Each structure stands twice: as structure tokens, then as C-alpha cells.
Image: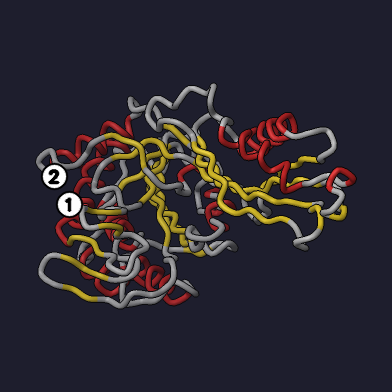
Amino acid sequence: MSAVGFDPVAFLDAAVRIESHEDVTAMREFLVDTLADHDADPLVDDAGNTLATKGSGAPHVVLNTHIDTVSPHVPYDRDGECIYGRGSCDAKGPLAAILAAFLGTDPGSGRLTLAVTPDEEVYSTGAAALDLSVLPGVDAPAGDAYVVGEPTGLDVCTAAKGRFEGTVRLSGANAHAAEPATGTNAVAAAEGALAAIRDFDADRDPHPSLGPATLTPTVIEGGDATNQVPADCAITVDRRSVPPESAEGFRESLETAVDDATTDAVDATFDLTERPTPFLEAFATDTDESVVRRLADAAARVTDGAGGTVRPFTAATEASYFSPAPTVVFGPGVLADGSGPVAHADREYVRIDAVERAATALTDALATLVD
């Protein structure tokens, strides 16, 4: 198995032309065909993950990214420096680099696995169900280290905040607005609930690399009639968490805080939004881990020091599903540049030389990790 004949830029050029914002079938078929053409023996598991592996033994390094994109589709375009279009940087550019590294690496004593997921932008159903033991010769369901392909500007990201969402519900009792004291006003109780939300992190120390967690009320609803004391109020919140906070730990803590901040006459509850997979929680990898040091050194070399900075990633990723195994986020492209948003935006693009350098950096790092 080798990368002979594989051109990551040519692969990306074709991949961006394939729409994968509503259905990933065509993009997955293209990926599977590409792997098969290079004798990589791909398989697709029951969750739609595309998998391939080679080598044996330890360490077992896993290369992961995703093939789905956000809506709406942005048509392909190209000039001498960049490829434009939906998915060019999030995350087909990283996928192209990862493929080049996977196909171009011959493990010595270690194992290298490719695991490409189908649903990162919505519920991460592929990553949540990922079990590497479906691969021939693999006994453990998880790897020893992970590289997750996302647009990081060729920096090596070792941590990211998680994202939780849920709704505070305040329940009182209806009454005529002319006799407000005979009811329990749930909308009025929102004053205390919002104060609890605002002060929730006041006594919490910021994470050393990710900084403080944030808690933001985003939607509020309450009341049915303008002449009635409202019995119900709901406040939706967005949580950007830092380690070691878990989704359930956050739920319990916020429910207690809101309950303490409202009167006994109001029933205060907080529930996380229902979803078929776990929330993407925060993760942090020790910067001394081999996967961090080797990839940072390789990225710095191929960019003459412009890349390879070890830093946090600013968006939630499927990397949290793979932690606590040492996990880094790395790839060509940027979430935003000096002119504004890039990933998920109408102007999404990736620089061609960044894709080539990412492929080289990954290949060089893997040669030392799985040799």
C-alpha cells in the first residue's frame, strides 16, 4: 500500500465538487473508491464510518476527520492559490492531507488507522459509534493516539471547549393580572434565574489553556395572554465548557443554582436538550505527549515556523469522543481570517500550498510515531 499516484490537491479538487451537505453517500463512495484504488482495503461500518488500517502492534495511531458539510452548498471554484467551495477547508482539505499521510506511511512496529465519520456537523453519530475492533487484526475499540482533521492553520491544537445546550423551566401558577398576588409569576422568576446564569462561573477558575467557561442565555419564552399571570417560562442556554466539567455535572450544578435563586413557590428545573449521541465535551491533551511534539515539530519545519504552534482549538469537535487518549486537532485552512469567517461561510476556501504542507507534516510525524 502506498501513496504512489495519490495527489491530495487533485483529490480535494474533485471532493469539493461533490455535494455532501444533505447526503454523504456520493462523497463516501468517492472516498471508498480512492482507498480501494490504492489497495487500502476500506470498509464501511454500520454507522457509516469509512475505515482502513495497516500495520500491527503499538502504538495505534488513528487519523480522523469527517465528510459531511454544513448547508447551504457553496459551488466549487479555483484559482492559482486557493480552492473554494463548501467543505474546502471544513473538512475536505484536512481529509486530503490525512489521506496522503495514511497512504504514504508504512508503519514499522505500530499500527495506523483511518476513520472518517459521516455526521460531525449534526449529531456525530459516526464518531459516537466508532469501534475500531471491527477492523481485521484490531482487538481494542479505541486507539492509543488520535489526529483529528480540522482547519487549524497548521497549528497543533491540544484542547477545545465543549458545547452543551439545555433549557431552564420555571413553573408557577396562572392568575388574573388584576390580582397578581393570587398566582405565581414564572416570567418574573426569570429575573432570579438569569442572575444565577450570569453568576454561574463567578467562583470558578479559568482553564489554563482554554480560559473561562461561558454560559449564555439564548432564547426565552413565557406567558400565553397579556392579561394573565404566566405560569411557565423557559430559558435556553448555550454552555461552552472546559475540563473537567461533564454534561451531567453541568446539568446538576445549574439546576441547583437556578433553584436556589428563585422562590420556593416556583418549581425550577434544568434539562439538557435531547439528542441521540453524547454532547461534545471539552478535552485537553498534555502538550508533552509524543503526538503533540512530533506533529508540532513537523508542522514548524514545513512552514518555516509559521505553523506548528501548540494552542487550543476554538470550536467543539469530535476529538472529545476520543479523549482521554492523547488527541490533537490539525489541518490546513482556517475558521476565520482577517476578512471574516471562512469555514461555514459563503467564502469558504483553503490554500493549495497549505494542503500540501499539511500532508507533508502529517507524513513526517507519522513516520516517527508508528515506526
**Which element is circle 1 on?**
helix
The quadrant of the rendering that contains the N terminus is bottom left
Callout 2, which amino acid? Val
Look at 41% across and 69% down and name the residue there: 32
x and y, in percent, of residue 282 in the image: 49, 38
In the rendered image, the residue lying farthest to the right is 182
Disc number for residue 335:
none
Q: Name the residue that disc number 1 marks.
A: 357
The quadrant of the rendering that contains the C terminus is top left
Q: Nearer the viewer, residue 300 or 250?
A: 250
Q: Name the residue that disc number 2 marks.
A: 302
Q: Nearer the viewer, residue 164 or 331?
A: 164
x and y, in percent, of residue 63 in the image: 38, 49
Q: Residue 184: in sight, yes or no?
A: yes
Callout 1, which amino acid? Arg
Q: Residues within 10 Å of mark 2 (few under 14, many from 20)?
A: many
> Which tag, 2 or 1, sits closer to the chain's start?
2
Look at 34% across and 64% down and name the residue there: 345
Q: Quadrant of residue 134?
A: bottom right
